[in-house]
Image (cartoon, rainbow, N blue to C red):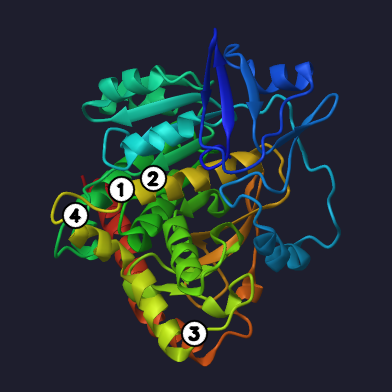
Amino acid sequence: MLYQLSAVYKSNRTLFLLSDMASTVTFSSVSAQAGLIQKPRNNGVTSYSGLKTSSSTVSFGLESSFLGRNASLRASVAPRIVPKAVSGSQISPQASYKVAVLGAAGGIGQPLGLLIKMSPLVSELHLYDIANVKGVAADLSHCNTPAQVLDFTGPSELANCLKGVDVVVIPAGVPRKPGMTRDDLFNINASIVKSLVEAVADNCPDAFIHIISNPVNSTVPIAAEVLKQKGVYNPKKLFGVTTLDVIRANTFVAQKKNLKLIDVDVPVVGGHAGITILPLLSKTRPSVTFTDEETEELTKRIQNAGTEVVEAKAGAGSATLSMAYAAARFVESSLRALAGDPDVYECTFIQSEVTDLPFFASRVKLGKNGVESVVSADLEGVTEYEAKALEALKAELKGSIEKGIAFANKQQEAVASV
């Protein structure tokens, strides 16, 4: 909620003001303030943008999120899912959650840790990696925000990192390099995700699990199979983070059509690689028209935006910063949902019945127990271009899903035969 909004943190006589991109709502209730931030300790937080207070509870305003005042997004989905208006969407004044980042010393993990550290809904931030995580934790711990930062190094400390955690974010793995496709990452990252999800299943099976490690089209099915093998699979709580495709689509459309970015919302469905990424430009809010050429150009750019960054960095990395921003937005949305906000929507890659594929990225409504409903209406009334693109992506996405499932099952068979 704070990453693009404003927040004021008070430490002794020093005030640190984060970028103010929205109006600030100051706590007027001492009890509400204390209830939100006293866990695990009192940090003297004086105000947060996007939060509203009453005499005894803390509630989220509609403008509270990375989406800012994105009324167009809510207008496009709420009528289909929430039959009656909800006023005073209250959350518990005791809302305070533990978040773990697995792969916290990497190019995505470090900026992601910083962004999560800024959330008043986080009481503890657990940072895990196989090396170099102590320095990251020490650095972040100096930021005068509520979350306590704890570091965990290596497999021997992974279980302790995960105990009692509410949200687990997994950006661990190797990044893309020039000329490398997401499938090239498979053999390395598949094993990493498998071992980490096994630990999650053993230590915090009820946590929301956010998979960032690529190829997401395969690593999410791997995670699902591992959780099934452990007997703790809950499809409502396993998410492939595809938020980066959404923020790219929003940005590119706003630039192309000279729109106010904070008002733009483009649902992106399918998967998270190449042609499996399908921005539904016809569903853009606010409503806007595109020529055939613009549709083709924007779709291709959104699909290949990751390669655009890899090539621009010329071997020095991939889309780490924008991915961290997107992942932090999804973490924030999850925390808001856990805290009781009834108006949380995101696109994400999940087990699905929307198409004939077992996994598919759709816009969903998030709640305390994970996915509450899927906005299947996004696939109704699409353009001919989008309908053809939807059919075209299915073969590739199906192959990636089956590849992940086959990997997990093969690994299980190998263990069973020992």
Between disc 3 and disc 1, the foreground one is 1
- Kindly identify which residue carries mark 3: 386
In which quadrant will I find the C terminus? top left
Between disc 4 and disc 2, the foreground one is 4
- Kindly identify which residue carries mark 4: 313
Residue 324, numbered label:
2
Say left or right for 281 vs 310: right
Residue drawn at (52%, 76%) of the image: 280
Q: Quadrant of residue 60?
A: top right
Q: Mark 4 or mark 3: which comes first in sequence?
A: 4
Circle 4 residues within 10 Å: few <14, some 14–19, many ≥20? some
- Residue type at mark 2: give it: Ala
- Residue type at mark 4: give it: Lys
Between disc 1 and disc 4, the foreground one is 4
Residue 385 higher or lower than 353, as above or below: below
- Circles 1 and 4, Cβ within 8 Å, touching? The answer is no
Residue 139 higher or lower than 74, as above or below: above
**Distance between the Cα atoms at labels 4 and 2?**
16 Å
Q: Mark 4 or mark 2: which comes first in sequence?
A: 4
Residue drawn at (48%, 53%) of the image: 239
Q: Mark 3 or mark 2: which comes first in sequence?
A: 2
Residue 153: x and y, percent? 27, 24
- Kindly identify which residue carries mark 1: 320
- Circles 2 and 1, Cβ within 8 Å, touching? The answer is yes
Residue drawn at (33%, 18%) of the image: 138
Residue drawn at (22%, 26%) of the image: 132
**Distance between the Cα atoms at labels 2 and 1?**
6 Å
- Residue type at mark 1: give it: Thr
Q: Nearer the viewer, residue 18 or 381?
A: 18
Residue at disc 1, secondary structure: helix
Residue at disc 3, secondary structure: helix
